[in-house]
Image (cartoon, rainbow, N blue to C red):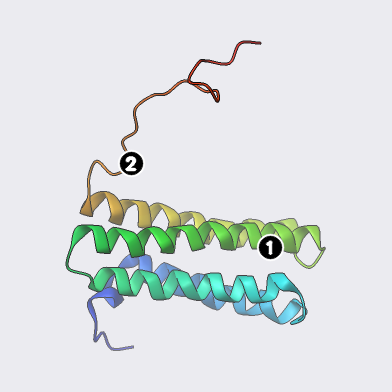
Amino acid sequence: MKIFFDHERLNAYQEVLKFAAWSEAVLDKTPRSSAVYGQLDRARTSIVLNLAEGNAKFTAPDRCKFLDISRGSTVECAACLDLLFVKQILSEAEVDAGKELLSKVASMLVGLIKRVIPDRFHEEAAPYGTDGEENQD
């Protein structure tokens, strides 16, 4: 396929398309009336579309916003695969194959976000607990 847009050059975009193609067979096995059918279809579509749109944004915050949505949809797809396993629609091997694709995509999206805003994932260490104090057992 000929490249017309910048997002088509991204390895992450090519990997997302692999997952979209792989998940066609999953959707074919899933009852259309099942809530997870629509959720998986929307989430996989969201990964592709938000990655493309984010790559087209000019400002760093705008770009990261869409890439972050794409990353969230990637994790959502992984959760959909878990539900399909629970529903006995997918085998463990099928779930693992899908999650392997999604894990690669998620890592690539984090890399793109870090490239735009390098300190985006830096967090200060904070104690756990609801009152600011460390939990004591």
* Residue at image mark 1: 94
What type is the residue that disc 2 sits on? Phe
Q: Position of residue 137 (x, y in %)?
A: 66, 11
Q: Residue furthest top?
A: 137
Q: Position of residue 103 (x, y in %)?
A: 50, 54
Please tell me the numbered disc located at residue 3.
none
For the residue carrying disc 2, how many other residues have a C-alpha within 10 Å: few (<14), some (14-19), or many (20+)? few
In the rendered image, which quarter is residue 24 located in? bottom right
Which numbered disc flags the more N-terminal residue, 1 or 2? 1
| Residue at point 52%, 23% (across, down) | 128
Q: Taking 3 as reference, is 45 left or right? A: right
| Residue at point 36%, 51% (across, down) | 110
What type is the residue that disc 1 sits on? Glu
| Residue at point 61%, 60% (across, down) | 97
Q: Position of residue 17 (x, y in %)?
A: 45, 75
Between 73 and 28, the residue placed more toward the observer is: 73
Q: Residue furthest front?
A: 131
Q: Taking 59 as reference, is 21 left or right? A: right
* Residue at image mark 2: 121
Between 129 and 70, the residue placed more toward the observer is: 129
| Residue at point 73%, 60% (across, down) | 83
Q: Taking 13 as reference, is 103 left or right? A: right
In this rendering, the label closer to the viewer, 1 or 2: 2
In the rendered image, which quarter is residue 71 located in? bottom left
- Disc 1 from disc 2: Cα separation: 31 Å
Q: Secondary structure at mark 1?
A: helix
For the residue carrying disc 1, how many other residues have a C-alpha within 10 Å: few (<14), some (14-19), or many (20+)? some
Q: Taking 44 as reference, is 137 left or right? A: right
From the image, which quarter does the N terminus lie in? bottom left
Q: Position of residue 65 (x, y in %)?
A: 33, 60
